[in-house]
Amino acid sequence: MNKYSFRINSSEDPQIIEILSTLQGKERTNFIREALRFYVKNGEIINKMSDNIQKMQKEMEKLSADIAEIKEMIKTQPAVADFNKNTVLLEHDKNNKKKTNEEILKGLVNDFLNM
């Protein structure tokens, strides 16, 4: 049986000190062994999950910026005197039929997703 020991840096490892200080003798040894086993078994998975979360956060920030840009574009649309709450006169389909706000929004989202 091999024995290992290590030192804890009090300024860098306050959480480790707090946990280990509540354990004594064999209990502390078992905790350290199980923690190392867990890391060996799951460390790579945890690192991949962390990387994926960071990528998703960046994508969400970009999406949020894109949504803000779309909102700004909508705000800058010129007002129309004969405005009906269910239609926007500036947008027409190929048959010159007025498009509803829902149809316009679906078109914007579809265009965004197909970029």
Image: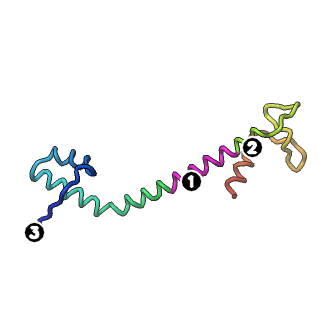
Quarter-wise, where is residue 49 in the image? bottom left
Q: Residue at x 48, y 55 (%)?
A: 54
Task: Tell me where residue 41 appears, x and y as whole percent.
Answer: 29, 63
Q: What label does residue 73 carry, if any? A: 2
Quarter-wise, where is residue 78 in the image? top right
Q: Residue at x 51, y 51 (%)?
A: 57
Q: What label does residue 1 carry, if any? A: 3
Could you tell me how far apart the alpha carbons at marks 3 and 2 are, in whole angstroms? 70 Å
What amino acid is found at the position of numbered circle 1 in the picture?
Answer: Glu
Residue segment shown in magenta: 55-69
Of 33 and 68, nearer the camera is 68
Dot 2, how many residues are within 10 Å of its Cα: few (below 14), some (14-19), or many (20+)?
A: few
Could you tell me how far apart the alpha carbons at marks 1 and 3 are, in whole angstroms? 49 Å
Question: SS class of the residue under badge 1?
Answer: helix
What amino acid is found at the position of numbered circle 3 in the picture?
Answer: Met
Is residue 103 a member of the stretch shown in magenta?
no
Could you tell me how far apart the alpha carbons at marks 2 and 1 are, in whole angstroms? 21 Å
Question: SS class of the residue under badge 3?
Answer: loop
First of labels 2, 1 by sequence position: 1
